[in-house]
Image (tube, rainbow, N blue to C red):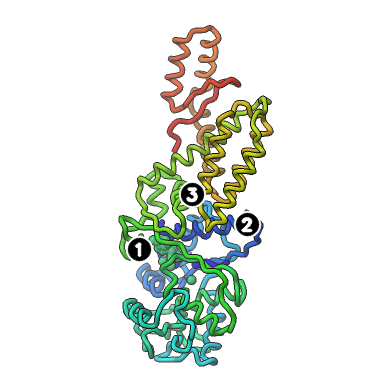
Amino acid sequence: MYSCGPTVYNYVHLGNLRAYVFVDLLKRYLQYSGYKIKHVMNVTDVDDKTIRDSQKAGKTLKEFTQLYEKEFIKDLGLMNIQMPDVMPRATDYISEMVKIIKKLEKKGLAYRADGSVYFKISKSKKYGELAGLEKQSLKENAEGRLNAADEYKKEDVNDFVLWKGWREEDGNAYWDTEIGRGRPGWHIECSAMSIKNLSETFDIHCGGEDLIFPHHTNEIAQSEGATGEKFVNYWLHNAHLLVNGQKMSKSLGNFYTLRDIMDKGYNPLLLRIILLKTHYRHVADFSFDNFTEAKSIAERFVNFLFSLDSIKEKGKNKQNVKRLISDCEKRFDKAMDDDLNVSEALAAVFDFMNEVNKSLNTLNVDQAKDVKDFILKIDGVFGFIENIYGDYLAKLKQKIKTTEIDRLLKEREEARNDRDFKKSDELRDEIQAIGFLIEDAKSGTVIKLKDWQ
Ligand code: AMP
Ligand code: ZN
């Protein structure tokens, strides 16, 4: 599996993160289903923007891009996105790119003009098939997209650049190669890195839907042109994350980064819930109100796991927990097999939790463990439950350590034993005032955290 990674000239925004969370979900679900995955995600560390902004910052291209690459990897960790098996940098694959370009030239699929090399799309019979483009609309589309940086000397406006000949404004961002001094075009980077790290044909290629044309369209044309083999078996594209109906993007300035979210006090995993909740092929509108629902989802899981962990005795074993688990598992798998239908899969898990909750106090320790193990197995796909629960427990422990809760609980216990209910109620109020919830269960008093998110 190959997924297009970030161009490292800035922090990634939440729209980008939607693309990476989607790939992570797909990968985790395939692993859960028994597939072995080799996942490659590139880092684009040379293009017009990285060159322009590194110059502005007075840094070398490498110094500049490595800074944002590091931040990107941090963001993946915060979102509990599994690291790819290979994370190639474009600048480490220049010779592979040159090899592909030379092959294309040899086959008459590429030509040189003004020190640059272009792909000749009129020679590519299936060009545009992925995007469902007719030649006419293709032409209009391409003309619409032409920008100053792309205006090299092409024979046809649709031809795209494989190799950009050096120009003064590129400064020292160049490579001297057999095809001249310059730097690669964006599309050839992904062909070279995917073929080298996977193979000429591989199974899955992902990216946001804005990449279908021209990026992935061009990747197919140049890869298949060079190898003569089918490039990719399955393409999966995520729809966009919008803000007020517009695509979240750096150029529109309507973006938030993970830092913005965390500065407002939100756990990044709540964002993971928000991004997972909308089906990957549907557009999703981002607003801070989304966090309310995400918090309530997190809370349901935390309460459920906490209740399971609180079961200490052997209950009467009334529920057929194993059957509930296997029914839920079937429903979960069916939903996820249906093009990753996360909301149906989540509904299956919530229904299951409701069933278990109905007679929670009759569960014994072993059943509680079976239920918890099942939730954690599901979380191998969702990737937020265990971490949020861990966060909750850490906060609870910290609060117990830094407050007088132990003394208050002891006094309340004594008051209850003395049947001094007025005092016991006062102590309950005091306990709640310092941020705990208190529940008197059969097996004893349980304290939970109030307002922990
Ligand atoms: P870029 O760094 O712009 O090349 O984008 C990196 C990845 O994020 C690509 O897969 C894009 O398609 C994806 N992407 C960019 N903006 C959005 C957005 N607003 N919503 C969803 N995905 C996006
Ligand atoms: Zn790419």
Residue 144 x/y as whole percent = 31, 77
Q: Amino acid at mark 1?
A: Lys
Q: According to the image, label 3 marks what residue?
A: 343
Q: Position of residue 63 (x, y in %)?
A: 46, 67
Q: Residue at x 50, y 65 (%)?
A: 236
Where is ligand 1, by quadrant?
bottom left
Looking at the rendered image, the quarter that the N terminus falls into is bottom right
- Mark 1 and mark 3: Cα distance apart in space: 29 Å
Q: Earlier in the sequence, mark 3 or mark 2?
A: 2
Q: Examine the rendered structure and indicate whether residue 79 appears above or below residue 307.
A: below
Identify the residue position indicated by label 2 in the image: 31
Q: Amino acid at mark 2?
A: Gln
Say which mark, if any, is on residue 426. none
**Which class describes the residues within 10 Å of circle 1: few (<14), some (14-19), or many (20+)?**
some
Of the pair 290 and 13, the residue shown nearer to us: 290
Q: Is there CB contact under 8 Å for labels 3 and 2?
A: no
User: Does residue 117 show up?
Assistant: no
Badge 1 marks a residue whose secondary structure is loop
Residue 113, located in which quarter of the rendered image?
bottom left
Does residue 392 lie above or below 59 as drawn? above
The residue lying at 45 percent from left, 30 percent from top is: 450
Q: Label 2 CB, ligand 1: below 8 Å?
A: no
Check whether the beta carbons of the residues at disc 1 and disc 2 lie within 8 A of each other: no
Q: Residues within 10 Å of mark 3 (few under 14, many from 20)?
A: some
Q: Comparing marks 1 and 2, which lies closer to the viewer? A: 2
Residue for badge 1: 250
Label 3 sits on a secondary structure element that is helix
User: Would you say the beta carbon of the disc 3 residue lies within 8 angstroms of ligand 1?
Assistant: no
Q: Is mark 1 within 8 Å of ligand 1?
A: yes
**Residue found at x 39% / y 55%:** 284
